[in-house]
């Protein structure tokens, strides 16, 4: 979209150049011709102003798209780390259960309970903006 806006700005500048060239090269000499040239210059200036507005809109769209992409990348990073932390906690909790089943009576410790709590942490859908809140919920996520 930014490219289309910028291209429209360039097209308007080209129209302004053509209008100026044509109006200045007309071999018509009179008061009316001078008024026509003045009006063409005014129109050229208006076209340049509109072209500048298109450029500014394109820059704003591009900046917004860059910010959205940054947030999507951040969400993906957090999501990947959260899944790894949860999977690790599940593995440790499973290992503790296996140890109990295997006959080790004191396998469960406070750390095992913490892993169970981490393993039960609900996660948002993939790519959702709520992933940005996960660093506060799961220890170990680095942004």
Image: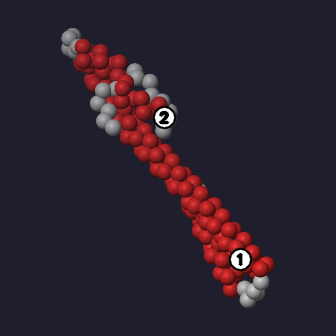
Per the rendering, the mark at residue 8 is none
Residue at the image position 66 percent from the left and 77 percent from the top = 20
Which image quadrant for residue 90?
top left
Q: Are marks 1 and 2 in contact (CB under 8 Å)?
A: no
Specify the quadrant that holds the C terminus.
Answer: top left
- Residue 85 versus residue 107 in the image, above or below: below
For label 2, the SS is: helix
Residue depth check, mark 1 versus mark 2: number of the one nearer the observer: 1
Residue at the image position 70 percent from the left and 73 percent from the top = 38
- Residue 11 makes an appearance in the image: no
Instruction: Please provide percent x and percent y for residue 33.
Output: 76, 80
Per the rendering, the mark at residue 129 is 2
Instruction: Left or right? Give the position of 34 relative to 122.
Output: right
Using the image as rendered, state which of residue 108 and residue 26 is in the foreground. Answer: 26
Instruction: Left or right? Give the position of 117 relative to 109.
Output: right
Using the image as rendered, state which of residue 77 and residue 35 is in the foreground. Answer: 35
What residue is pinned by disc 1? 37
Which image quadrant for residue 51?
bottom right
Instruction: Please provide percent x and percent y for residue 62.
Output: 51, 54
Residue found farthest to the front: 31
Instruction: Left or right? Give the position of 13 relative to 113.
Output: right
Instruction: Please provide percent x and percent y for residue 55.
Output: 56, 60
For label 1, the SS is: helix
Residue at the image position 63 percent from the left and 76 percent from the top = 17
């Amino acid at each position: 979209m930014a490219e289309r806006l910028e291209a429209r700005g360039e097209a308007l500048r080209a129209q302004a150049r053509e209008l100026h060239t044509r109006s200045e090269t007309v071999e018509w000499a009179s008061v009316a011709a001078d008024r026509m040239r003045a009006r063409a210059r005014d129109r050229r200036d208006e076209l340049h102003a509109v072209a500048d507005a298109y450029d500014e809109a394109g820059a704003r769209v591009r900046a917004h798209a860059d910010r959205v992409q940054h947030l999507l990348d951040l969400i993906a990073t957090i999501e990947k780390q959260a899944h790894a932390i949860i999977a690790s906690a599940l593995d440790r909790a499973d290992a503790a259960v296996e140890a109990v089943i295997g006959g080790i009576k004191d396998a469960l410790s406070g750390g095992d309970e913490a892993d169970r709590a981490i393993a039960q942490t609900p996660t948002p859908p993939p790519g959702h903006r709520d992933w940005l809140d996960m660093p506060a919920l799961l220890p170990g996520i680095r942004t």
